[in-house]
Amino acid sequence: MDVNKVRQSFPILHQEVNGHPLVYLDSAATSQKSQQVIDSIDQYYKEYNSNVHRGVHTLGTKATDGYEGARDKVRRFINAKSTQEIIFTRGTTTSINTVAYSYGRTNLQEGDEIVITPMEHHSNIIPWQQTAKATGATLKYIPLQEDGTISLEDVKDTITDNTKIVAMMHVSNVLGTINPIKEVTDIAHEHGAVMLVDGAQSAPHMRVDVQDLDCDFFAFSGHKMGGPTGIGVLYGKKHILEKMEPVEFGGEMIDFVNWYDSTWKELPWKFEGGTPIIAGAIGLGAAIDFLEEVGLDDIEAHERDLAQYAMDRLKSIEGVTIYGPQERAGLITFNLDDVHPHDVATVLDAEGIAVRAGHHCAQPLMKWLNVSATARASFYMYNTKEDVDAFVDGLQKTKEFFGDVF
Amino acid sequence: MSFNNLDQLYRQVIMDHYKNPRNKGSLEGEHLAVDMNNPTCGDRIQLQLKVQDGIVEDAKFDGEGCSISLSSASMMTQAIKGKKVEDAVEMSKVFSDIMQGKEIDKDMDELGDIQALQGVAKFPARIKCATLPWKAMEQGVEEKE
């Protein structure tokens, strides 16, 4: 993989921020977009913007082909059996909420359990809290090991025959932990529970095969994988989706509408009420093409290398605490003694280095870590060792700067 | 932007309030209490005010946050103690104007240490840190009324 060639496709990276070359280390929040993705959206609006699935005119057909073509790219990307299992949503949050609302509220009752982990993003906690409140089900947490991983023993101890839903992130956006989804799915299935995977931090960075994982639902966002904001995916096994009711009703999703009753289109369209996110889906399709061209295995290896390199270099700075396991995805969450993460991020920003500071939408995990906030550097295919060097040097300067003012 | 701007942001006086916060802790006896957090970053301020006959008799705060939010809280409690409630609220408006980079017709000297926070206006992402304790104060006295 030629990082410099990859970088050439991302116009945003070639600029100065605060007088320094931009070092973008916040891809776990949102990734940058390649010229190819930007062009695909531009081309759609300039050449064939039209509504899908209805017009008989030529542009309408082109738009429908573009939109449905993107669905097939997604299907291939995660190796789903059929495009009927690929629902376009607004993002991971909407995908999880759709399952919590449609599947959760119909299939759960008092005495049932929903099992999640303390490392989840808010978008994989709150929908389940709300579902538990609405149905009388109980929300349970698989405890974390000291290094921020989960043990299969604990998984086995937490999931019972009363468990109906297990929801877990594939890769932690804070700890970088890669969860053993396949094994957890097996345990969930042994107890008759369905398995939902939050793939927001995995799908952009590693090869995902939903048939191999055998999970029942898999949710991810376009904007974290080089695609535009406002588009995401909910994968669900066909036989489960077929039994689920739509969450949004209106145009596009109907079969027949009578005065007092209506019927729904077949999958996946019954879950896509209203004019869909056509440009977003086309942009996501282009992002998938880009990822496949670069190669997901190479991307994953490259990011892990960067993370390990950064971990090694950070050891040279006294007072840096790194959270999460040694074996991790391409991100590093840390704190610098005596300097609040917001202050760290502000000083790094003055050096043109973009990192995230805050609770990363994981307040329960912050509580578990016993911190109010942390800073995070996250890597993608377009980051380089020089980026890591700039980051570590910036952190050293931060330490000196605050050492001086104190 | 350079370290020069950063120096303005993190002036000595701000760091002094951060490292040695004034009025940190909690009040005894009857008082108003306001908890306010910045949900985007997790900063949290617990502000306690003793208001009698329209005067802020005492003020204390506790909480977690960055150097800007905590030093701002420290400076604010110092500034509003002994002030009429309406003057404290007026001061909050002036502070908000300064943060938004607006021209103000007040004599800056009246603001005391608070004027050290002027540099924050150049860092839009940090303005909410500085205004958090002031918003808490405004909410507290509003509830009282």
Image (cartoon, helix red, strand yellow):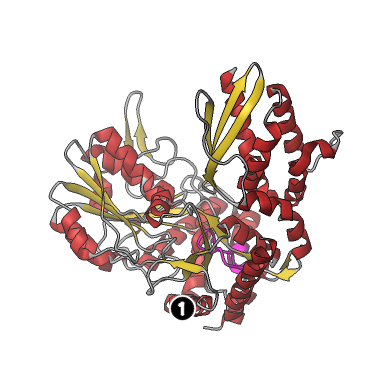
Q: Residue at x 40, y 62 (%)?
A: A172
Q: In the image, is residue A175 above or below residue B110? A: below
Residue A237 placement: quadrant = bottom left
Q: Is A334 or A165 nearer to us in this picture?
A: A334
Magenta residues span A23-38
- Tag count in the figure? 1
Q: In the image, is residue A370 above or below residue A311? A: above
Q: Is residue B103 visible?
A: no
| Residue A270 pos. (x, y %) | 36, 43
Residue neighbourhood size for the residue with mark 1, other residues' Cα within 10 Å, grouped as few (<14), some (14–19), many (≥20): some
Q: Quadrant of the C terminus of chain A?
A: bottom right
Q: Which residue is mark 1?
A: A308
Q: Is A180 or B81 nearer to us in this picture?
A: B81
Question: What type is the residue that disc 1 sits on?
Answer: Gln
Judge from the rendering whether residue A319 lies leftward or rightward of residue A166; answer left or right.
Answer: right
Q: Residue A272: within the magenta?
A: no
Q: Residue A27: within the magenta?
A: yes
Residue A273 placement: quadrant = top left
| Residue A1 pos. (x, y %) | 51, 83
Judge from the rendering whether residue A391 lies leftward or rightward of residue B111; answer left or right.
Answer: left
Judge from the rendering whether residue B5 lies leftward or rightward of residue A155; answer left or right.
Answer: right
Q: Residue at x 23, y 61 (%)?
A: A185
Q: Is A120 or A294 nearer to us in this picture?
A: A120
Provide the major secondary structure of the magenta segment. Answer: loop
Q: In the image, is residue A154 above or below residue B47? A: below
